[in-house]
Image (spheres, rainbow, N blue to C red):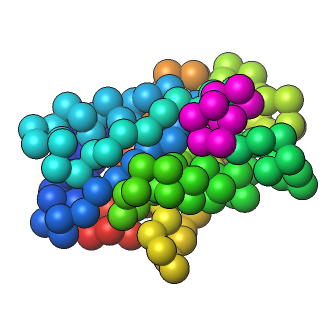
Amino acid sequence: MHVSASALAACLKARRQRIAVAESSTGGLIAAALLAEPGASAYLLGGGVIYTAQAREALLGITPAGMEGMRSASVAHALLLARRVREKHGADWGLAETGAAGPTGNRYGDAAGHCCIAVVWPGVESVITLETGRADRRANMYHFAQGAFGLAIKMIG
């Protein structure tokens, strides 16, 4: 995972830009890998693990009314998280991940291994959905983090 974090860190440093991260099923792996790179304070503003509705409201100010018409672990939710974490931190880029790591699916009907990842910049947004087809929680968490690094590098680099 750190190779991708290194590549993303290098992209952000080269552009002199900063990122904020909202994670759900990766549980902080994305931010931890970025923070492990030397000089992280130049590009990583922070973020949070948005694992529950309580965390979503407390950390990003997204109320139940703000979630009306969407569900967690969806493209729309990933975009909302990325937009809001970017805005709240005053970052150039927002990166968000939301999914079902496993070993079972989530209450919304997504199978284990389902994840949506969004990267946003003012006027530019990209979102992908990953489906690993696996129930291995740890493997899915790492796969989701890799997907987040890949999308961010594609967008930023």
Horizontally, is 26 left or right of 77 in the view? left
For this rendering, which residue is in front, 111 or 84? 84
Q: How many numbered marks appear?
A: 0
Which residue corresponds to the image point at 36% horizontal and 64% vertical from the top-left? 92
Q: Is residue 13 above or below residue 149?
A: below
Residue 43 % position (x, y): 23, 51
Residue 122 relative to residue 36: left or right: right
**Residue placed most toward the observer, 156 or 147:** 156
**View extreme (left): residue:** 38
The image shows residue 2, relative to residue 90, as above or below, that is above
- Tell me the magenta residue range: 53-61
> Which quarter of the image is occupied by the N terminus?
top left
| Residue at 68% in and 20% down | 103
Residue 21 image-quadrant placement: top left
Q: Where is residue 23 drawn, in percent x and y?
A: 52, 37
Q: As drawn, is 121 to the left or to the right of 31?
A: right
Q: Relative to 107, does residue 88 appear above or below in the rendering? A: below
Q: Is residue 11 visible?
A: no
Which quadrant holds residue 101? top right
Quadrant showing the C terminus? bottom left
Residue 6 as seen in the image, left or right of residue 51: left
Q: Is residue 60 magenta?
A: yes
